[in-house]
Image (cartoon, rainbow, N blue to C red):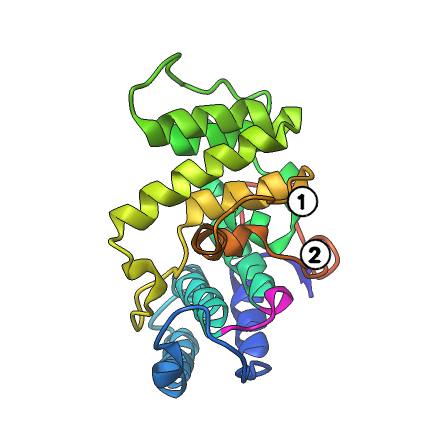
Amino acid sequence: MGILNYQSFCVFVAQEFQEITLPSVSERRMGVSEYANDIISYIERDLNTVHSLISLESSTWENGAKSTTDLALEITSFLYAIGAQHRVWRRWASLTAFGLFLQGKFLEAAQYACFGGEWEFIKILPSTTLKSQQISDQVFWKLVHPNFSANLPKNTTNDEDHAWLQLIKSIPAKDHSQTENALKEIADFWMAEDEDDWINFHPRSYPDFETPVCAVAALARHHGFQPTSLTPEQFSFLEAGLAIPEPSPMFPKIFSLSAYSTASPV
């Protein structure tokens, strides 16, 4: 495809959308099949609107890329929820990562790149200072960029935050037992927080997985972690990060970056 920029991204996503086929397998989120045809129609309408506005010079490729990124995320989530093969929805996660990169959202780009298995792409992401002071974000960015100076407390009384602080040690050390315990703690927290509604599909409300914890689970898997004692509910909650296989990476084979700047995507 060539250099990743606003226009090439929008064009490629529109082409990829035409290749989508809906699977006839067990859904991962209850009720999604009921809305499947409508959601595909809505997304197609919105993608067509993006290109129509650009052709009429009522919008720019930059604005189009922002809208297209949001639609790529919705497609990622929808395909995951409806039970598409992991390599299929993860390819869309890669596209979501590229779109987020174009917007300068490097943390979110890294999270979705983890789902897509875009490990070479993650390496070139700028290790900028995070605006977010969330412990989960600081931990994840530190795991992605070991030289990043994370702003983390030495101690915390919050069980979820404590689990995140454990991951910053256990994943690089390949302490898989500790990693599993921490992921269990975080999964249990969010399942309780969502009052078990996380398993249900809500049309056009996405993503259908908890991005930060599933992304760090994917990172742990990349470092050799394999779950051994998760409950079925815990695995289902973390499945977006833990399941295999990954698709073939799209970077730099399909998309590459211009040499002049990784932060100027025009």
Q: Could you tell which of marks 2 and 1 lies nearer the N-terminus?
A: 1
Q: Position of residue 216 (x, y in %)?
A: 52, 40
Please determine whether, in this image, residue 57 is positioned above or below residue 209: below
Label 1, secondary structure: give it: helix
Q: Residues within 10 Å of mark 1 (few under 14, many from 20)?
A: some
Q: Residue at x 55, y 66 (%)?
A: 89
Quadrant, the N terminus = bottom right
Please determine whether, in this image, residue 41 is positioned above or below residue 100: below
Rounded to the nearest angstrom, the CA distance separating label 2 from label 1 is: 8 Å
Q: Residue at x 32, y 67 (%)?
A: 200
Q: In the rendered image, which quarter is residue 186 located in? A: top left
Residue 94 located left or right of residue 155? right
Q: Position of residue 252 (x, y in %)?
A: 72, 53
Q: Position of residue 174 (x, y in %)?
A: 66, 29
Q: Residue at x 54, y 80 (%)?
A: 25
- Quick check: can you spot residue 124? no
Q: Kindly identify which residue carries mark 2.
A: 249
What is the magenta range? Answer: 83-88
Q: Residues within 10 Å of mark 2 (few under 14, many from 20)?
A: some
Q: In the rendered image, which quarter is residue 138 located in? A: top left
Q: Kindly identify which residue carries mark 1.
A: 119
Please determine whether, in this image, residue 241 is positioned above or below residue 32: above
Q: For the residue marked with disc 1, what is the amino acid?
A: Trp
Residue 88 located left or right of residue 106? right
Q: Is residue 52 magenta?
A: no
Label 2, secondary structure: give it: loop
Instruction: Verify CB contact (< 8 Å) between mark 2 and mark 1.
Output: yes
Q: Nearer the viewer, residue 105 or 3?
A: 105
Q: For the residue marked with disc 2, what is the amino acid?
A: Pro
